[in-house]
Image (tube, helix red, strand yellow):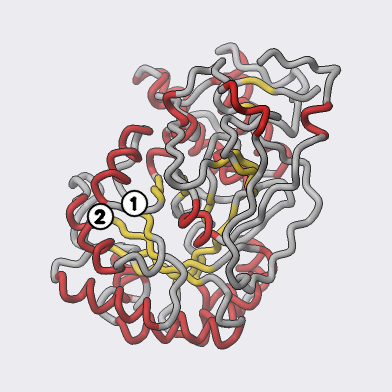
Amino acid sequence: MTYDPEDETPWAALPAPEVLPVQRMLEEFDVVNVLAPLVRCSKLPFRHLVSLYETHVTTTPMILAEEFSRSQLARVSDFSTSANERGVFWMEPRGRGLDFASLSLDSHPEDVEDAAAAPGPSRPPHKTYYVPPPHTRLPPTATPPTKHSRLVRGALLAQMASPNAASLADAAELVAPHVDGLDINCGCPQRWAYAEGIGCALLRKPELVADMVKTVHDRLGHGFPVSIKIRVDDDPRATETLVRNALAVGVSHITIHGRTRHQASTEPVSLPAIKFAVDLVRGEVPTVANGDLWELADAEKMRRETGVNGTMAARGLLANPALFAGYATTPQHAVENFVNLSDDYGFIFSLFHRHLAYMLEAHMYKPEKTYFNALASSVQVIDYLSGRGLDFVTPRKVPMWDASRGYSLLA
């Protein structure tokens, strides 16, 4: 398709995107890509960035519920959002089998003229408190890839950790108007978290986890989406009890990290252990797999071998924010987009610098990494990148970005 910048008719004819709970996205679409809750890193500029590259669901960093509910300072520092951070995507209904990675950059099926955003199946509405404000996000192309494609708005989850149900419900009530659901952290393996009774400490407290889900539902309504993110347990019976208790109180979906709390990130993820947990769910709610996802083929293998509905990436997206769009390494335009988003949103230098170091690692020799890591200000970083040929001056053709082709579509 050749884009004529003077002709905006295809964009004007787009239907309004569907706004769906994460549970329905996972149930209804073949491929659902998720950004993990990254410690200090999955903040607003980075969430917006990955949403430009086929990441359908994003998650905040883990938020400590007690501090969030008690402190205005914690709320300001831990959570921010914008009308435009969620992406808009063409998504393929389950069973239609569109493989985004295999599409030619210029491919365009002949049957797209008949495409229309089909409505989802009839079901009781989820009770969310987020009301989408006006936004300027558009999908990667004006024309759907297939006649079955549906136009869908992305989703944002707030992930929280708490040692008790009351504090979690207090924090959930505060954040609910701004997000599409709450995720409970039952998987952080760090020693300080375990000592505080959060994260992996909850893996063997199934009654407490169930009480957390129930208490949030009692506060916000039983349709409000509450999910849990767990790790597999050394004792399969513990995983079974945790999963069954969560299902009994209406958990919306379950994310499974394929390592135990004692395993370091250098140890391989166990796909059979993830599949064991998925089988325990018995299809009652959707599941998402997490761990060792570094390229698009890893996500495809994970879905195939575990039976999950969605895949979640953490370090893989840090290294390559365009991973889900099929790029092997971070493309130049992703770095340019990140710099501009960070400038627009106002990102603290330490995180700005760290993200760029992750993105550029595969593109630098060791002496370059040493030099880059020693840069002490955003100005120095941008000067350095400009010297390598990156362009931060040419006006961005926002809000539209075609992730598969690597260029903007709207003037």
User: Residue tagged by mark 2?
Assistant: 258
Mark-to-mark CA distance, 1 and 2: 7 Å
Residue 167 sits above or below residue 280 on the image: below
Residue 306 sits above or below residue 363 on the image: below
User: Residue tagged by mark 1?
Assistant: 290
Q: Are marks 1 and 2 in contact (CB under 8 Å)?
A: yes
Crowding at dot 2, Cα within 10 Å, few <14 / some 14-19 / many 20+, comes out as many
Residue 362 sits above or below residue 131 on the image: above
- Label 2 amino acid? Gly
Crowding at dot 1, Cα within 10 Å, few <14 / some 14-19 / many 20+, comes out as many
Secondary structure beneath label 2: loop
Residue found at x 62% / y 28%: 112
x, y percentage for residue 249?
42, 82
Where on the picture, by quarter, is residue 245?
Answer: bottom left
Q: Is residue 359 left or right of residue 140?
A: left
Pick the front one: 204 or 34: 34
Residue found at x 53% / y 82%: 216
